[in-house]
Structures are given as structure tokens and as C-alpha cells.
Amino acid sequence: MTDWGSHGDGTPDEVQTPFVAWGSGIAPTKTKINLTQVDIAPLQSALLGIAIPSNSFGIVPINLLGHLPDKYIFQSVYANFKQMSEQFLIRRAERRAHSFRFLFCEYPELSYEGLVKIENEIIRLAQLKRYEAAWKV
């Protein structure tokens, strides 16, 4: 918001805001980390150990979760993956239902089967306790 009350313009003065986070679970850093506004809700959810809001488009910023155990970071990222993939599948079905079939482009990697394949690999790595490899899939 500007000094004169307008908002929504998209200028740097209106959209860039400092965000300060410290405490248990936050990785100390001496460099500036850019965080998008949509990533704040997943970050807060990960730190509080609660579900990410279902309509969030944000991604858990794992570079800020440095002092948490790998298993906890994995669980946060996996929950984010599940939430985002479910949201994607719902939106994909909506688009498919309201598009001409010849105009709808299906990407095999992002089909239901493709997402199940990715999830199975994530689960396999987690069962092997390779949490960092699992969250990087």
C-alpha cells in the first residue's frame, strides 16, 4: 500500500516486504533469502506442524528449515506434495471437462499415473530413510 492509500499496483514499494523469522527450526543465515508471499503459509504450517491450507499454491521453503530433523523436513515437503498434487488433479479435471478434447494437452508426467509413480518413489526413498533424496524428487 502506498502513502496515499492506493494498492494493487505491483510496484516494488507495494509488493516487497521484509519478513523476519528466527527461533527453533529456522536455519541461521547471513545472506538474504527471498521468500514469495505464497510460501509464507506453507512455512508457518511446517514450523507449527499443522496441515498446509488446501488452496495454497506455496512451496515449503526447505532452505529456511535447517535445524529441523531430516525426517520432519521430509514430512513437511511430502505433505506439501500431496496437497499440491491433489489440487492440481482437481484443477486438471475441471479444465478437461470445460475444454474441447483436441485443445486439452495431457502431459504424461503430470497424469494421475505419473504422480502416483513419483509418490511411490518418494515413499520408497523414505522407507530407506533417505529423506533428503526423497524430498528432492
Image (cartoon, rainbow, N blue to C red):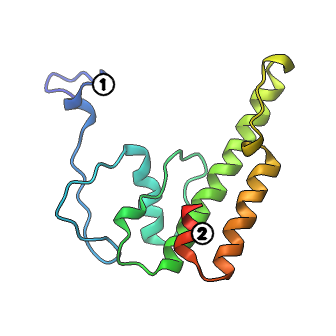
Q: How many marks can you see?
A: 2
**Which residue appears farthest toward the right when viewing the image?**
101
Give residue 134's mark: 2
Q: Nearer the viewer, residue 23 or 69?
A: 69
Amino acid on which disc 2 is placed:
Ala
Whether residue 26 appears in this view of the structure is yes
Dot 1: element = loop
The nearer-to-camera label among 1 and 2 is 2
Asked whether, in this view, residue 100 is left or right of residue 27, the answer is: right
Q: Nearer the viewer, residue 60 or 13?
A: 60
Q: CA distance from mark 1 to mark 2?
A: 36 Å
The residue drawn where x is 29% and y is 48% is 34
The residue drawn where x is 68% and y is 42% is 88
Amino acid on which disc 1 is placed:
Gly
Q: Which residue is mark 1?
A: 10
Q: Position of residue 123 (x, y in %)?
A: 70, 71
